Amino acid sequence: MTDLEAALRRAVRGEVGFDVTSRALTTMDASNYRRVPLGVVAPRDADDVAAVLEVCREHGVPVVARGGGTSIAGQATGTGVVLDFTRHMNRLVGLDPQARTAVVQPGLVLDRLQEAAAPHGLRFGPDPSTHSRCTLGGMIGNNSCGSHSVAWGTTADSVRELTVLTARGRRLRPGRDWAGAPDGLRELVDGGLARLRTGFPDLPRRISGYALDALLPERGADVARSFCGSEGTLGVLTEAVVRLVESPRARALAVLGYADEAGAAEAAAGLLPLGPLTVEGMAVDLVPSTQGLPRGGAWLFVETGGDTEAEARARAEAVVRAADVVDARVVTDPAGMRTLWRIREDASGTATRMADGSEAWPGWEDCAVPPARLGGYLRDFRSLLSAHGLRGTPYGHFGDGCIHVRVDFDLLTDAGVARFRRFSEELADLVVAHGGSLSGEHGDGQARAELLPRMYGAETVALFERAKAVWDPDDLLNPGMLVRPAPLDTNLRFSVLPREPVDVEFGYPSDGGDFSAAVRRCVGVAKCRTTSVTGSSVMCPSFRATGDEEHSTRGRARLLHEMLAGELVTDGWRSTEVRDALDLCLSCKGCRSDCPVGVDMATYKAEFLHHHYEGRRRPAAHYAMGWLPVWLRWTARTRTAPAVNALASVGPLARVAKWLGGIAGEREVPRLAGETFSRWWRGRRRGPAGDGDLVVLWPDTFTEHLSPNVGRAAVRVLEAAGLRVALPPTLRGPGGIGDGTSRSPLALLTARRGQVCCGLTYVSTGQLDRARAVMRRTLDLMAPVLETSAPVVVLEPSCAAALRTDLPELLHDDPRAARLAERVLTFAETLERHAPHWAPPAVDLPAVGQTHCHQHAVLGDAADRRLRASAGLTGELSGGCCGLAGNFGFEDGHYEVSAACAEDQLLPSVREAPDGAVVLADGFSCRTQLEQLAGVRGRHLAEVLAEGLE
């Protein structure tokens, strides 16, 4: 234990982390930069913060304040001690509706403040796209803005008073009329009045540099306002009094279509006199689908408010009339507006990939110019990109003249980094030529501070340095930011990654087969750190259960980044730190769809576990549950299911079996079916064959051995819809399809019996060699099916997802894998595509439950929604993950997190269900979780429809 660590442990009551994991999680924010801290402290209160500052001052160690870690310029990273305010100092201290103020701690997430203010008809004005995870402290440090700044300004406009600790331990309360000013600040201002009055560009989004002009007497000598945007370099915020604004009772959204982004940009300023709440812009490059948008190549999102929906709509329609547009659409439905806004908010992540899949990076993320000059600036910006052979797609706050863009810089080679510097210098000059600010929202950090002399001149920058010295004479707080900055092309986070591709098992088709590129996908926007989800969203259930960064998708990606770098995490694939962080990953695949850049942590986990345990003994659960298909097939062949069930019901025997198998003691072992689905299929009486399409019903492990009733129900419904149902062959050789086997004498003599399997349990436990062998055997068995046009119907969503994604990505060298993946359909998709004229029975009941996480992430549930509606099943299914997630919830040590995930959305939705509601759960894991935690029987949609047929 170092002297610094020991001193901090003695001085503070909060957590002190100098371990590899704590440090690795905070090496990066959402920028291009990486700095390795000595340690991390999660202070419990202001006294802890004071103690940390005292210890670090004595040891000469820098201190960096950190909130959600979503900063895009590098200012939330540091080489000393990082203060993590999100763990403890995250409370709403008070809210006064009459005064329209709130008292907040720096680690409070913005959405929590909005939720508390909403019942009073109030809100905090600024709302960055990261509102679900950014903190008030970080917003004050960066002077954040968001989409509603045309109505309510920047964070500085919403700050009344701050409570700040200086690096030398003084407690100050900055406010107006010089309140809380450190000694020497007023004298510094008095000596530079002329420069402060003339040296700052006048535009709504001037975030760069220190806001020393807020200290002018004619501006109220507002010390709190001047502190905003100082990026943690002047003092450490411990509390803030912020102003709230009245939230419109009704809103409308006018989406205006233009031919291109320049046309949209030139139109934006002309809409400001109409008093909109927002004027946001983006081009078609960033829109995954234009469904729901009016015609055009670029759009303005203009929000209006009013006391009634009619008033808000009238204002939106006035905007449409005033705009010269290609097409327009006005939306007042809250769900419809949320869907459209999500397109804009996700741009911060989707912008990290160009249309061809190549990478794009921040660095020139948020320059701002006067709104009236935005069109001309964008044209010049495009020309500069072309001159340097670069690409980027601008979007952002057109009404404020603030543009976000990620550029396809090559930050992996020396030549590319040199071009990054040249472009940065020329772009800084271009912004200044248009009367703009290098930063219009996210701060200067390391990305732009070096270029501040081009914007302000040497004398004003020298004034910034003197102001920093007044507040922090020892340069203890976040050194290298804003003044005396580190060069913009140093500390790049990519420089530590291996230059050659890492030898891996999966194909990573979207990343050119490069695992490093896959890990680089995570840019740190931290959507995975959202503490509550809406609609069908899933990501990231383990973070919501624990609140720990290491159990977020971003945290795990950071640890994998450090594993590849080899500086902090030095034992590569054998790393226990990475293993422990991945241990609570449910492999729900939620990040594959909900992460704006498509990080696929389930695949990365499987990859890691494969290498981590290669040549070594695995945990017992990997053998017990990873090889589940083998054990269940053995039980079926020996017809010992009744004996196994009987033994599992004997308490002492069950406890021993669970201990040996690495299964949580709190869990009940699911009962095996007395008759497998395939055995029922072979022995059933068949009616006359229909004349509809042939469909091949996949007998997945769960349907086959644990829930054959689901398979029987599906057969009944599919045949009622006129489809001809067959099972896959069970013999490798000259077999066929039709009844699940081949009875040809020649086939019986020349072929070996087998059973199709998606390999899911082997993939989820990282047994990729075994998974590959199982998948190849399956492809051999499915050869006759692939020669037909028959779809493959998979009832278990997790197995369908494995066939759609894991199969072709793991067997990327076998073209049959892609062909089989293309054939896979869900139950609802099969009925919709192959029996389009069939009408399901009228069930006419409310439905609750949960969309399976793999269905949400990989398969999609649009067909299921339409099928439920046709059957009269009303109501929305919840999102999230049930928490059992295959083997995860059964593994020893996972029970509490598994139960917490279920309590996030699934169990509350079931408890609140109306009388007579159908509990839908297509996944075996979901049904098991419902039964074991709530005593509720969930049913597959096929079961509900089959009952309706009766």
Image (cartoon, helix red, strand yellow):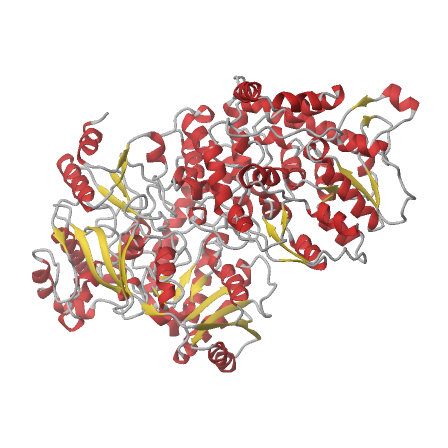
Q: Residue at x 43, y 29 (%)?
A: 580
Q: Quadrant of residue 543?
A: top left
Q: Residue at x 42, y 78 (%)?
A: 270
Residue 431: image location, x then y, percent: 35, 63
Q: Nearer the viewer, residue 883 or 855?
A: 883
Q: Nearer the viewer, residue 895 or 648?
A: 648
Q: Residue at x 38, y 39 (%)?
A: 548
Q: Is residue 277 left or right of residue 632?
A: left
Residue 845: image location, x then y, percent: 67, 56
Would you place residue 60 above or below residue 744 in this image? Answer: below
Would you place residue 826 above or below residue 304 in this image? Answer: above
- The answer to whether one can see residue 499 in this image is no
Q: Nearer the viewer, residue 755 or 949?
A: 949
Would you place residue 870 above or below residue 100 in this image? Answer: above
Q: Quadrant of the N terminus?
A: top left
Residue 774: image location, x then y, percent: 69, 27
Q: Residue at x 35, y 59 (%)?
A: 116
Q: Quadrant of residue 687?
A: top right
Count of numbered labels shown in the rendering: 0
Residue 120: image location, x then y, percent: 35, 67
- The answer to whether one can see residue 166 in this image is yes
